[in-house]
């Protein structure tokens, strides 16, 4: 920068998900801003494909992309690997776990979601959530480990070793239930000839009465039927009351013995929201104005899953990749408008619809603003298209994803245990596993 150049606006972005990367990419190359993108990982993780990692269809590298590589050609964007622990909204300064601090002219908070366990006793300690790549790998290792254990000791089936309980029949719970049932049939059955794979079961529990609640009535029925055909047992109208190391307690008094409880029960803003000194609303998310700034805190934006973004109907936009990506780009537009002395504009979300993939040939999509409903192969094609677009929003190459998509109908995963020590289960650690077991469902 020469002496004559005006000072740059210093933008600090917390979180390199769809929202943070979307914002940083839209600011890249604009010399009036200097951007610092902070994430606790040095990669962007593509959450919509975590199921495929958990069920061994995709590898870590297919869904993680180095943040530094993304901004290699953007000299005004620098990436910092650090965990933000505190936000001082008055000075727009963030502090990281290693004691560093970053002050900003404009602070963009986009730290995403974490599992919300709703204070269910034992849920945080004994369930496996699916919100990060590490979560997905831990789940995959658990699934493989229980099969390996039963292969060595078939009696463990009576202790629930092959019973998989999924909590929450929203998109996360429904998709992982379908993927898991498919993995058991297509991959575990041929690979574990000495295991009575027929004894394996996936149980999907939800206190509501519908699968895929936010979708239409037709989608509820379609998804329930697809799960049933895949062999998933639905226990709707039933809550989870507690979770132990080897069991799940249900609101109807039943106990299910299991060594694998997958938590898809709900999300809340990432924990740093509680250390931001900023107003939190539903799901602990930060409340934002239509232009994505936080009222009474000039120069602070909150985006994506971290924010309750108002929609024109007066509700909040859903926690979706497309909302996050578009909100990131819109925030960048408003930051540049502010610098240029132009007014900021309200976020105008272009609704791509909602979709869920339940298994091979079984997907449901409500496409476009009017949520036109599609099922089966057409819905799968829509799912692929929307996700390829999302992926190109954060990185330039989508080849692994497209390969996976086109290969999906004939694809089988590989069941390698990367860290078999870490995956090992202590089968004697539940003093109170309950009287019921898988057969008593
Ligand atoms: C299993 C799963 C499947 C999904 N499937 C779909 C789908 O099919 N379609 C769809 O549209 N949406 C889907 N979603 C939702 C979608 O992934 C999210 O809405 C989207 O990722 C939100 O983007 P974001 O940038 O707000 O947050 P995230 O993508 O979560 O990114 C947040 C980033 O912040 C970082 N971070 C968090 N805390 C800190 C901290 N304290 N310090 C530093 N960095 C921090 C994290 O490491 C992360 O990189 C799915 C979500 C999950 C979990």
Image (spheres, rainbow, N blue to C red):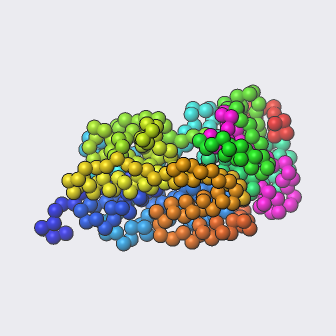
Inspect this view and state whether residue 278 appears: yes
Q: How many marks?
A: 0
> Residue at point 75% right, 40% down?
234
Inspect this view and state whether residue 264 appears: no
Question: Residue 284, located in which quarter of the rendered image?
Answer: top left
Residue 245 x %, y %: 69, 39
> Residue at point 85% right, 51% down?
198
Q: Nearer the viewer, residue 250 or 363?
A: 363
Q: Nearer the viewer, residue 289 or 343?
A: 343
Magenta-colored stretch includes residue 147: no
Magenta-colored stretch includes residue 210: yes
Residue 4 x %, y %: 12, 67
Residue 35 x %, y %: 31, 60
- Reply above or below: 27 against 298: below
Left or right: residue 262 versus residue 196 is: left
Q: In what quadrant of the picture does the N terminus appear?
A: bottom left
Magenta region: 184-213
> Residue at point 60% right, 69% down?
402
Furthest toward the left, the residue is 4
- Reply above or below: 238 against 263: above
Left or right: residue 325 versus residue 379 is: left
> Residue at point 68% right, 44% down?
218
Q: In what quadrant of the picture does the C terminus appear?
A: top right
Left or right: residue 284 versus residue 197 is: left
Q: Nearer the viewer, residue 121 or 64?
A: 64
- Reply above or below: 136 against 29: above
Residue 17 x %, y %: 46, 55
């Amino acid at each position: 920068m020469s002496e004559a150049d005006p000072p740059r606006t210093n933008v600090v972005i917390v979180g390199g998900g769809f929202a943070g990367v979307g914002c940083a990419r839209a600011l890249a190359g604009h010399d009036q801003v200097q951007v610092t993108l902070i994430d606790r990982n040095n990669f962007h993780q593509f959450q919509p494909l975590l199921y495929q990692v958990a069920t061994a269809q995709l590898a870590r590298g297919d869904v993680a992309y180095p943040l530094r590589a993304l901004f290699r050609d953007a000299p005004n964007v620098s990436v910092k690997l650090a965990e933000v622990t505190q936000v001082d909204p008055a000075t727009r300064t963030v502090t990281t776990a290693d004691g560093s601090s970053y002050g900003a002219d404009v602070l963009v908070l986009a730290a995403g979601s974490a599992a919300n366990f709703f204070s269910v006793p034992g849920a945080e300690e004994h369930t496996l959530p699916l919100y990060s790549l590490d979560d997905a790998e831990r789940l995959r290792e658990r699934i493989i480990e229980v099969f390996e254990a039963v292969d060595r000791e078939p009696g463990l089936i009576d202790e629930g070793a092959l019973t998989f309980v999924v909590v929450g029949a929203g998109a996360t719970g429904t998709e992982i239930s379908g993927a898991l049932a498919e993995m058991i049939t297509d991959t575990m059955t041929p690979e574990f000839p000495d295991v009575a794979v027929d004894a394996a079961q996936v149980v999907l529990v939800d206190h509501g009465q519908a699968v895929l609640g936010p979708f239409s009535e037709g989608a509820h029925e379609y998804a329930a039927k697809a799960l049933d055909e895949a062999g998933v047992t639905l226990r709707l109208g039933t809550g989870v009351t507690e979770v132990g190391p080897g069991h799940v307690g249900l609101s109807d008094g039943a106990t299910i013995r299991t060594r694998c409880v997958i938590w898809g029960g709900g999300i809340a803003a990432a924990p740093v929201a509680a250390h931001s000194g900023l107003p939190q609303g539903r799901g602990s998310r930060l409340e934002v104005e239509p232009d994505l700034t936080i009222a009474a805190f000039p120069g602070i934006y909150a985006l994506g899953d971290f924010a309750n973004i108002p929609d024109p109907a007066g509700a909040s936009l859903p926690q979706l990749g497309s909302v996050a990506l578009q909100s990131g780009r819109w925030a960048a537009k408003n930051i540049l408008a502010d610098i240029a002395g132009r007014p900021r504009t309200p976020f105008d979300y272009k609704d791509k619809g909602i979709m869920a993939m339940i298994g091979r040939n079984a997907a449901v999509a409500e496409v476009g603003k009017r949520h036109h409903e599609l099922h089966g192969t057409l819905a799968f094609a829509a799912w692929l298209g929307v996700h390829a677009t999302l992926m190109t929003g954060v990185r330039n190459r989508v080849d692994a994803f497209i390969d996976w998509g086109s290969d999906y109908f004939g694809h089988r995963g590989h069941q390698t245990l990367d860290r078999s020590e870490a995956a090992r289960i202590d089968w004697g650690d539940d003093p109170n596993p309950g009287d019921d077991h898988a057969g008593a469902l």
